[in-house]
Amino acid sequence: MPRNTVPEKFDALVIGSGFGGSMVAHSLVGAGARVLMLERGDWVERGPENWAADGAFLLTRHYTKETPYRVLQSRRWEEQGICACVGGPSVFYGGASFRYREQDFTPRPDITAGSGAEWPIDYADLAPHYTEAERLLGVAGRAGDDPTEPPRSGPYPAAPAPIATTSRRIADAARGLGLHPFRIPLAISSQAEGEGGCVACTTCDGFACAVGAKNDLATRVLPDLLARGLELRPNTVVVRLLTEGGKAVGVECFDKAKNARVVHRADRVILAAGALASPHLLLSSGLERMSTAPQAVGRYLMRHCNAMIYGVFPRPPDPANEHHKQIAIQDFYFGTGSGDSARKLGNIQQVMTPPVGLVRAMLPPGIGHVAARLVPLLTGLLVIAEDQPRAANGVEIDRSRTDSFGLPGLRVTHRYSARDLKARRALAREAKKILRAAGARLTVTWNVNTFSHAVGTVRLGADPTTAPLDENCAFRGVENLYVVDGSFMPTSAGLNPSLTIAANALRVGKGIGEF
């Protein structure tokens, strides 16, 4: 395999183009830095093919097992892939853009459970960066309706789209139960904003947007950064972090286009590869040995304890077949009543009815055909229960296996605690009540086992002996090395993490220093 060392040196090198990578690059480029971004995947093409059944993320080439992860699921090991594309998971997410609540930054003992998890920053530290992230992503929402909403300095950048028939039905049912439904803040441009707006299709969450209305990073942020000088190298797999004299100085990577190993050097190296891939690189490079908290590198993995609750209705609840991921409910976020419901629970929000073609494609032929006939009678709610940070959950290197690029294998172990499962069950009960009040004859529960909300594997904290990162997301023990993806979170809160990752990366980028 040919080897090529690139002599040029950058002010900052960013690994990954997701929320952490793109937003830290935004701050650095704005400060006049020369920034190189490395992304292992390629651009996602946009067009009618995104609406097809095989446009679902798991069926595209952007879900890759080039570097397979062995994941312990239900007492057995299975092989999973990762998202690899320009813009990262934002290209396939559903656009939900929540701020964490003020209280999320001072987590309760029933969440931390002796794990040492703490936030050395608070909501006020992130508030201005939340505002900027919402502006960059064009988040549409309505302030004041969410009963747990934290303080805001102003309205959302855009107003939400007209409410769909199904969403109105769910909202009315929730109000009838004494709840306070509100519009999900979404990074989606509505038709009212002109050409390129949302066409209200049902292939949104889990699909790339065919018309570019979902304001993912590849659509909304990266093109502007490229025009302002960011250098982006897609199809580049980082295999090792390089250090000299206790300082991060660059990376060794594999350039797929050149079929060659390449070295890139920079004054600062910023990891934003994701809560599984970032610790993978740190551990495979042996940098945990330089950490002040080596036992925490790769540990305390969280992914939310999620479930989708689908209601089966006597007639199609969505006769117009329109986008209806619009309503959220926060009445149970901090718990209510007594017993299990007194503990912190999490969020309930609408999910899209799965496209018929996707159901046929994902299930065995006989089952898929039958199930597809029921799809028009379904609509659902997603429950997001905050999960505990536990040292037993995490990733570790498997040097008995290597991929084609030379990266050692990775084993991922995660089990929910009894507390996590109780919280999910409590939220699921409330979701079922709402669906039944909306007219569902019965409900079906699907527990989510993906790592789409993975956080926590290289956490920040005030104590150097328990947190690999300081309050500025600098890796303790290695100078000029930062981690800005979801790995930085000491707790998961009970909401989609993307906006908090984005806001924190903007904060870190602005604080790294002058170039």
Image (cartoon, helix red, strand yellow):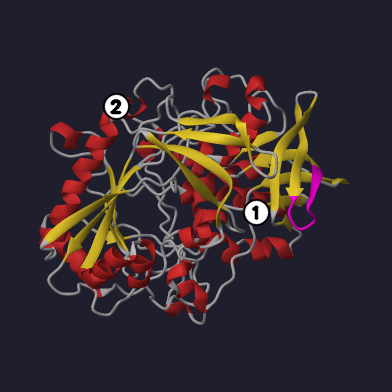
The amino acid beneath tag 1 is His
Dot 1 surroundings within 10 Å: few (below 14), some, or many (20 or more)?
Answer: many
Q: Quadrant of residue 96?
A: bottom left
**Circle 1 is placed at which residue position?**
26
The amino acid at mark 2 is Asp
Name which quarter of the figure residue 434 lies in.
bottom left
Q: In x, y percent, where is residue 50?
A: 49, 72
| Residue 159 horizontal/vertical position (percent) | 39, 69
Magenta-span inclusion, residue 297: no
> How many labels sit on residues?
2
- 274 vs 389, left or right, is right
- Identify which residue is drawn at 43% across, 55% down: 97
Name the foreground residue: 43 vs 225: 43
Q: Residues within 10 Å of mark 2 (few under 14, many from 20)?
A: few
State which tag comes first along the sequence, 1 or 2: 1
**Mark 1 or mark 2, which is nearer to you?**
2
Reading the image, the residue beneath label 2 is: 110
Horizontal side of 380 relative to 404 (left or right) equals left
Asked if residue 156 is positioned above or below residue 511 in the image, the reply reads below
Residue shown at the point (65%, 20%) measured from the top left: 289
Which mark is on residue 460?
none
Going by the image, does 203 lie left or right of 183?
A: right
Mark 2, secondary structure of its residue: helix
Secondary structure, mark 1, is helix
Magenta highlight range:
255-264
Residue 363, x across and y down, in percent: 34, 61
Q: Residue, x 48% and y 68% (percent of image)?
A: 55
Q: Residue at x 65, y 52 (%)?
A: 40
Chief secondary structure of the magenta span?
strand
Query: Which residue of the protein is positioned furthest toward the front in this rendering?
Result: 366
* Relative height, residue 206 to residue 486 (above, below): below
